[in-house]
Amino acid sequence: MPDFDVIVVGGGPAGAACARSCVQASLRTLLVERGTLPRFKPCSGLVALEAERFVTRNFGPIPDSCRSSSGDYTGIALHFPSVPSLFLPGLCQAANVWRHTFDQFLVEHTGAEVRDGTLFEAVEEVPEGVAVRLRARASRGSRVTARYLVACDGGYSRVVRTIAPTVHDDTAWALVYQRYYRGRIELDAGPYHSLLTRDMGIYTWVTFKDDLIIVGCGCMRGDKIGGYHGRLVDYLRGRFGFEPKESVRDEGCLGNALGPTNRFFLGKGRVLVAGEAAGFLHLGGEGISGALETGWLAGQAVAGSIAAGDDALGRYQMSTRGERERVLDQWSFTRLFRSFSHPMALASAFGRYPWRHYPALVRDTYRFLDQQARGSGVGAAMVRNSWQRLLTRRRYEVGRVEADQAGS
Ligand SMILES: Cc1cc2nc3c(=O)[nH]c(=O)nc-3n(C[C@H](O)[C@H](O)[C@H](O)COP(=O)(O)OP(=O)(O)OC[C@H]3O[C@@H](n4cnc5c(N)ncnc54)[C@H](O)[C@@H]3O)c2cc1C
């Protein structure tokens, strides 16, 4: 008899949702988190409406203590360099939370045994399932067994790098960085501000939490993020009268481009992978909804396979198909301009501008997207997937690594 039915690695949204669904199915569930709760996570804390609905249904309403006192996100504001800024109310409308307390709230409501300050180190298959080596701070490693392990340990997943070291051979990585300031800026605290300006990184944002202004950007791994961020701060000074008085916090991390390039990694043998570790990340960097959804599906796959005595990974591959298509649609150029519910909402943004702004708008957008696409291979993969979806009018060939996973 293994020590647990399932071990979940990672105390983010995917791990919490997975643990919650396992506990609901009466599985003996252990959740391990390397940080000490509440642990910080680089994020804008935008909890999309569907994610909030999921949380309310399965964990209860988001407590006020997790929410930013600056208020919820009221929409998205797009700032192109050559045309006036545009506020799109309703789009990107979302709760604005602090991730450390939000994630702690989720984890504490899973009902699972939780061990924080505990690092996943290694996993091997054994007759009863998996044997996992864990290390709590300042202690020697321990060996814990379970029928299944679910990896929810984020974009730079140690579990994935352990069980499938070659998966990331061709992965493009984004480095994202944000800094929290006290100061002033001539921007409304309600919207999520997206700056579609070249040379300040592949993705650029300004958000607000409590009395803090958060300025962030991303670039491809290997580029120097400091230069982009410095240019962004200068740009904000010039265009929006940004006056930073004090910098109170820095954070950054790596994000994989598995999903945008249609290379989801869902697991191997008795290890399932959910959330950003598997590649579930939407355009604009929205990852909480996909993490909750796939963490939940992974838990259900494990519970179903234990009950039926069949293959959890096969179940999970089937059940995540819709979510994978949703991610690909988000990163599709051809659907980007059609979908009015898209977070970037370029189509509806274009529709709101007077005709005389169109040449500048098209030029700005092209210059921004062109910069995003170069160098990393991400743009080429997105174009390929986009045209396939548009021209063949059939579903994506999602998860072409599935065969390798099942066979390995
Ligand atoms: C700057 C930035 C802004 C973002 N803004 C938003 C936003 O506003 N809205 C949104 O929806 N998404 C946003 N995202 C994306 C979102 O943060 C992620 O997609 C989401 O958190 C993924 O959830 P997850 O549970 O898969 O992984 P994570 O939330 O990353 O959780 C993984 C957990 O695993 C733990 N862990 C890692 N390794 C180990 C190990 N070896 N042993 C034990 N534990 C381990 C980590 O400590 C972490 O707690 C943002 C991302 C970034 C970088």
Image: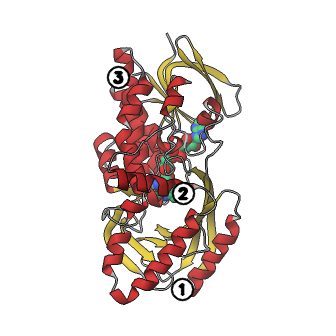
Mark 1: amino acid: Arg
**Residue in the picture at 48% in, 69% down:** 207
Q: Earlier in the sequence, mark 2 or mark 1?
A: 1
Label 1, secondary structure: give it.
helix
Q: Is residue 150 visible?
A: no
Q: How many marks?
A: 3
**Residue in the picture at 51% in, 50% down:** 261
**Residue in the picture at 62% in, 52% down:** 173
Label 3, secondary structure: give it.
helix
**Residue in the picture at 30% in, 65% down:** 340
Question: Which residue is label 3 attached to?
Answer: 304
Label 2, secondary structure: give it.
helix
Residue 94: x %, y % from top left: 35, 61
- Residue 123 is tagged as none
Up-down: is 141 above or below 61?
Answer: above
Considering depth in this image, is 236 or 380 the residue closer to the camera?
380
Query: Tags 3 and 2 in contact by the CB under 8 Å rule?
Result: no
Image quadrant where residue 123 sits: top right
Mark 2: amino acid: Ala
Q: Is residue 224 visible?
A: yes
Question: Which residue is label 1 attached to?
Answer: 239
Residue 139: x %, y % from top left: 70, 28
Marks 2/1: CA–CA distance: 33 Å
